[in-house]
Image (cartoon, rainbow, N blue to C red):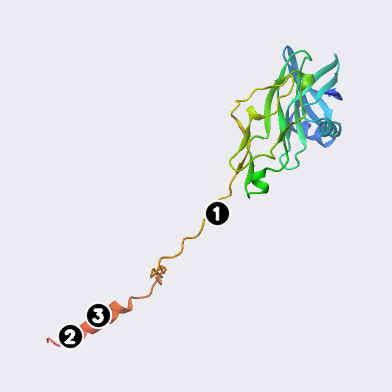
């Protein structure tokens, strides 16, 4: 994997207001840390970082120009703006090219499942990235999964992912990545013969019961006739 060089500026841990001002200037607050490395606040150029990620992927090996010299790192976490999805903070983890690292790699679906194409099924994407352990130089940008042969009720688990040299899948082998399910349509049951549709009861507020009122009026003369 090609190493991406990023120019950085050291910074003091600032207030929320100062960080907001830095972002408006096109800078992204970041931190560089790792084993036996003291966490160091830094600044990176937003456009340069986004371009590097778009071209080389989020798992690219990054070379940071720090005061003590160039340091190799990987992007461990990107915090994004909830509306614009622009990066607002980045965590860089120090790495050694001879030590294995745990990283998450995105899954790429290839082809159209047979169960979707010919039988009207729906493909459900359950896990969009998978965790692997490997040397930094062997980190794949993505893992492609061919779903063309999948029928209704079939899927791909971590155990079924392609074997990549020097790459070990960390997640449970039974973890489901993607599967094809049938579309269920509930049919309306026909009404039984002779059955009448229930009518809603309507009660008018303040209106007297005409039947009861009429019965009371009829009983009044009968009571007077006894006198």
Q: Which residue is mark 2?
A: 222
Q: Is residue 153 toward the left or the right of residue 90 in the image?
A: left
Give the vertical position of 188 relative to 166 (above or below). Answer: below
Q: Which residue is mark 1?
A: 185
Q: Which residue is mark 3?
A: 216
- x%, y% of residue 150? 65, 40
Sequence-first disc among 1 and 3: 1
Front one among 39 and 193: 193
Quarter assignment of residue 105: top right
Disc 1 to disc 2: CB gap under 8 Å: no
Sequence-first disc among 1 and 2: 1
- Label 3 sits on a secondary structure element that is helix
- Label 2 sits on a secondary structure element that is helix
Q: Residues within 10 Å of mark 2 (few under 14, many from 20)?
A: few
Location of the N terminus (image quadrant): top right
Q: Residue at x 52, y 55 (%)?
A: 186
């Amino acid at each position: 994997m090609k190493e991406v060089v990023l120019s950085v500026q050291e910074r003091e841990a600032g207030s929320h207001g100062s960080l907001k001002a830095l972002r408006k200037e096109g800078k992204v607050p970041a931190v560089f840390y790792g084993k036996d490395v003291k966490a160091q606040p830094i600044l990176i150029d937003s456009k340069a970082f986004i371009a590097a990620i778009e071209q080389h992927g989020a798992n690219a090996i990054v070379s940071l120009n720090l005061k003590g010299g160039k340091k190799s790192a990987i992007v461990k976490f990107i915090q994004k703006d909830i509306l614009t999805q622009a990066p607002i903070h980045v965590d860089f983890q120090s790495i050694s090219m001879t030590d294995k690292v745990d990283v998450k790699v995105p899954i790429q679906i290839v082809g159209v499942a047979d169960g979707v194409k010919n039988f009207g099924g729906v493909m459900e994407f359950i896990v969009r990235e998978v965790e692997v352990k490997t040397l930094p130089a062997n980190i794949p940008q993505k893992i492609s999964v061919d779903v063309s042969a999948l029928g209704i009720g079939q899927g791909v688990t971590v155990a079924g992912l392609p074997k990549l040299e020097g790459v070990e899948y960390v997640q449970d082998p039974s973890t489901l990545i993607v599967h094809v399910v049938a579309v269920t349509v509930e049919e309306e049951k026909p009404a039984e013969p002779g059955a009448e549709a229930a009518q809603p009861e309507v009660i008018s507020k303040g209106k007297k019961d005409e039947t009861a009122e009429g019965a009371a009026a009829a009983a009044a003369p009968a009571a007077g006739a006894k006198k």
